[in-house]
Image: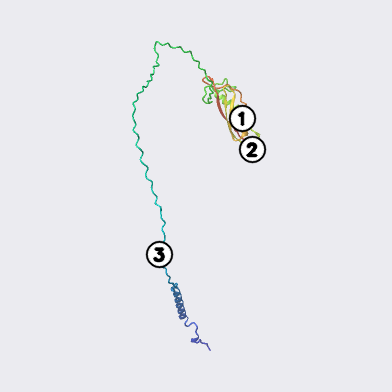
């Protein structure tokens, strides 16, 4: 025997209708909540002002600044009387300094002009007679011989300072010295990367021999000369 459901016991029969009714109720509540307005209670206050109190206020008195009167105009200058100059002024007479043939002319003794020993310095590149290095007296090109002998002297006396070798110091020392009017070497100046290298360059230049001085117009003059000494580690 088959069991049949009772139509009255069907729970989902009107579910759609109930859903629509519930949705409409919820939307109505939300709309009412959004449109709800509330106003504050208003109290009646007397906001009138007492104008009489403001009218009774005293206004302070201001002092008026008086402008001082303008200064009186300057007095008119007194009339100046012109007095005639009656004093006689002596005129200065300038006499002529020209001589006439009648005047005797004194003979002037000859004046000896002493030659001043000027301390002239002429560069090595432009001097007329270059200084002569010992051993270059018979050379036809004394300037080139001078430079060759300088290089030979540096190679002969060159010693690399031990302390500079240990420190790994190397570079070029620029040396400038002056060949004096008596052929001696003086006024030695130098600049290099290290004091020990400069000291060695000074020692080499001080060992230069005495030379024949350079001449300009037949007179002995000072001749500055510059040469670089290169210190290079192997």
Q: Would residue 118 appear left or right of 233 to someone viewing this image? A: left
Q: CA distance from mark 2 to mark 1?
A: 20 Å
Considering only order in the chain, which callout, 1 or 2, is on the residue closer to the N terminus? Answer: 2
**Element class at badge 1:** helix
Q: Would residue 158 appear left or right of 96 to someone viewing this image? A: right
**Element class at badge 3:** helix
- Using a 10 Å C-alpha cutoff, classify the residue at mark 2 as few (fewer than 14 neighbours), some (14 to 19) or many (20 or more): few
Residue 78, picture quadrant: top left
Residue highlighted by disc 3: 52
Q: Nearer the viewer, mark 2 or mark 1?
A: 1
Number of numbered discs present? 3
* Circles 2, 1 touching at the beta carbon (< 8 Å): no
Q: Position of residue 165 (x, y in %)?
A: 64, 36
Q: CA distance from mark 3 to mark 2?
A: 104 Å
Q: Position of residue 82 (x, y in %)?
A: 33, 29
Q: Residue reaching furthest bottom?
A: 1
Residue 160, picture quadrant: top right
Q: Is residue 130 above or below residue 28?
A: above
Q: Is residue 199 above or below residue 2?
A: above
Q: CA distance from mark 3 to mark 1?
A: 109 Å
Residue highlighted by disc 2: 167
Q: Position of residue 199 (x, y in %)?
A: 62, 31
Of residues 197 and 120, the one nearer the viewer is: 120
**Element class at badge 2:** helix
Considering only order in the chain, which callout, 1 or 3, is on the residue closer to the N terminus? Answer: 3
Residue highlighted by disc 1: 202
* Circles 3, 2 touching at the beta carbon (< 8 Å): no
Of residues 8 and 70, the one nearer the viewer is: 70
């Amino acid at each position: 025997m088959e069991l049949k459901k009772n139509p009255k016991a069907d729970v989902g029969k009107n579910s759609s209708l109930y859903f629509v009714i519930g949705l409409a109720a919820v939307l109505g509540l939300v709309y009412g909540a959004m449109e709800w307005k509330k106003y504050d209670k208003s109290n009646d206050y007397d906001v009138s002002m007492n104008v009489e109190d403001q009218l009774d206020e005293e206004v302070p008195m201001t002092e008026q600044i008086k402008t001082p009167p303008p200064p009186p105009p300057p007095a008119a200058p007194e009339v100046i009387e012109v007095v005639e100059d009656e004093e006689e002024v002596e005129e200065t007479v300038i006499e002529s300094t020209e001589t006439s043939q009648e005047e005797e002319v004194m003979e002037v003794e000859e004046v000896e002009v002493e030659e001043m020993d000027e301390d002239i310095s002429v560069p090595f590149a432009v001097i007329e007679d270059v200084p002569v290095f010992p051993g270059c007296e018979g050379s036809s090109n004394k300037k080139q011989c001078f430079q060759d002998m300088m290089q030979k002297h540096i190679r002969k006396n060159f010693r690399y300072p031990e302390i500079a070798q240990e420190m790994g110091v190397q570079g070029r020392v620029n040396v400038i010295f002056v060949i004096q009017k008596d052929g001696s070497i003086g006024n030695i100046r130098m600049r290099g990367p290290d004091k020990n290298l400069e000291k060695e360059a000074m020692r080499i230049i001080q060992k230069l021999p005495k030379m024949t001085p350079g001449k300009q117009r037949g007179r002995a003059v000072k001749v500055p000369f510059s040469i670089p000494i290169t210190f290079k580690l192997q």
